[in-house]
């Protein structure tokens, strides 16, 4: 597996935590994530409830991008790219 120096983490992919936060917000801000809520996300076009349980509570470390995207969109969310570096292009100068 190729390791990307620009996207490294020790434990679970940070997108899992970001999505968990969105699921909690959609659940009225409750920290508890009920099976019924995961089942609704699945019904709305997201991945299976068991897949999401494996992300949030199981051993999944690197979820597939398409399934993360599907879960977010089933929640009515869209990911966007934002600058994380002051010049917006990875620290390299434009030529």
Image (spheres, rainbow, N blue to C red):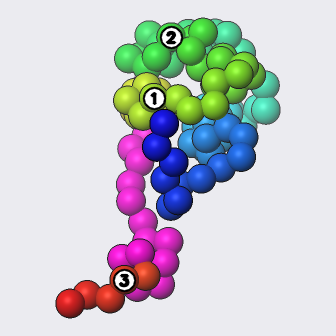
Residue 11: name its quadrant: top right
Q: Could you tell which of marks 2 and 3 lies nearer the N-terminus?
A: 2
Pointer 1 residue: 64
Q: Magenta residues: mostly which secondary structure? A: loop
Write the residue at 42% across / 66% down: 82
Q: CA distance from mark 2 to mark 1?
A: 13 Å
Is disc 3 surrounded by few (<14), some (14 to 19) or many (20+) residues within 10 Å? few
Write the residue at 36% across / 77% down: 89
Residue 78 placement (x, y as % from top left): 39, 44
Range of magenta residues: 74-90
SS state under label 3: loop
Task: Locate residue 73 relative to residue 38 in the image: left or right.
Answer: left
Q: Could you tell which of marks 3 and 1 lies nearer the N-terminus?
A: 1
Which numbered tag is attached to residue 39? none
Q: Nearer the viewer, residue 70 or 24?
A: 70
Q: Is residue 79 above or below residue 61?
A: below
Residue at the outermost left position: 95
Disc 2 to disc 1: CB gap under 8 Å: no
Which numbered tag is attached to residue 92? 3
Q: Could you tell which of marks 2 and 1 lies nearer the N-terminus?
A: 2
Pointer 2 residue: 48
Q: How many marks?
A: 3
């Amino acid at each position: 597996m190729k390791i990307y120096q620009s996207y490294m983490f020790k434990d679970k992919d940070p997108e899992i935590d970001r999505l968990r936060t969105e699921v909690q917000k959609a659940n009225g801000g409750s920290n508890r994530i009920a099976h019924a809520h995961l089942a609704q996300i699945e019904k709305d076009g997201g991945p299976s409830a068991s897949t999401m349980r494996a992300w949030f509570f199981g051993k999944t470390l690197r979820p597939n991008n398409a399934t993360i995207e599907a879960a977010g969109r089933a929640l009515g969310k869209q990911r966007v790219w934002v600058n994380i570096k002051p010049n917006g292009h990875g620290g390299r100068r434009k030529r």
